[in-house]
């Protein structure tokens, strides 16, 4: 029983490290970085987002991109103007496949969740 608890603890630590590493990888930003816009509140950042998009964002994006979308891991994780840099199709591909330090969410998000999130992000210019 003691060994099982050690393995469970080790697995938990590895899961946390994988999440942090995905957010802090020193590689090109998947959404093109961007200027950090000071003073934008979470409510302002979420403007125009449906309830579905808000839920998906809070459950899957918030840890790396912050509640106001300015990015928790520096300016390269800023999504405040993602639509000014990428098309909806490019955003869908990034969400599904990941890359540049971002994990892929294909299989974790439903296609309609990915589409709704990408449409909303594409409107951020």
Image (cartoon, grey):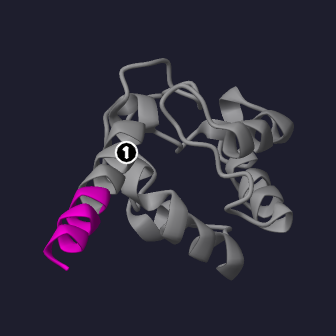
In the picture, the quarter occupied by the N terminus is: bottom left
| Residue 63 shows in the view | yes
Say left or right for 63 vs 81: left
Would residue 9 be counted in the magenta stretch?
yes
Above or below, 51 against 71 in this view is: below
Which region is colored magenta? 1-11
Q: Is residue 50 visible?
A: no
Check disc 1 and report its element: helix, strand or loop.
helix
Please report the residue visible at 46 percent of the width from the left and 39 percent of the height from the top.
78
Residue 74 included in the magenta stretch of the image = no
* Image point (65%, 47%), residue name: 124
- Where residue 88 appears, as percent x and y from the top left, is 82, 42
Could you say which is closer to the camera, residue 15 or residue 122?
A: 15
Question: What secondary structure is the magenta-colored segment mainly?
Answer: helix
Query: Residue 16 location, x and y as percent?
Result: 30, 54
Dot 1 corresponds to which residue? 18
Residue 90 as seen in the image, left or right of residue 94? right
Q: Position of residue 55 (x, y in %)?
A: 59, 76
Q: Going by the picture, which residue comes out furthest to the left?
A: 2
């Amino acid at each position: 029983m003691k060994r099982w608890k050690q393995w469970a603890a080790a697995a938990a630590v590895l899961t946390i490290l994988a999440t942090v590493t995905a957010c802090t990888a020193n590689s090109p930003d998947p959404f093109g970085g961007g200027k950090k816009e000071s003073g934008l509140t979470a409510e302002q950042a979420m403007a125009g987002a449906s309830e579905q998009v808000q839920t998906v964002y809070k459950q899957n994006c918030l840890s790396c991109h912050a509640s106001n979308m300015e990015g928790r891991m520096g300016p390269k994780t800023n999504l405040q103007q993602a639509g000014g840099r990428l098309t909806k199709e490019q955003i869908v591909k990034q969400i599904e496949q990941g890359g540049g330090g971002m994990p892929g969410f294909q299989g974790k998000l439903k296609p309609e969740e990915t589409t709704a999130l990408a449409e909303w992000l594409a409107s951020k210019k």
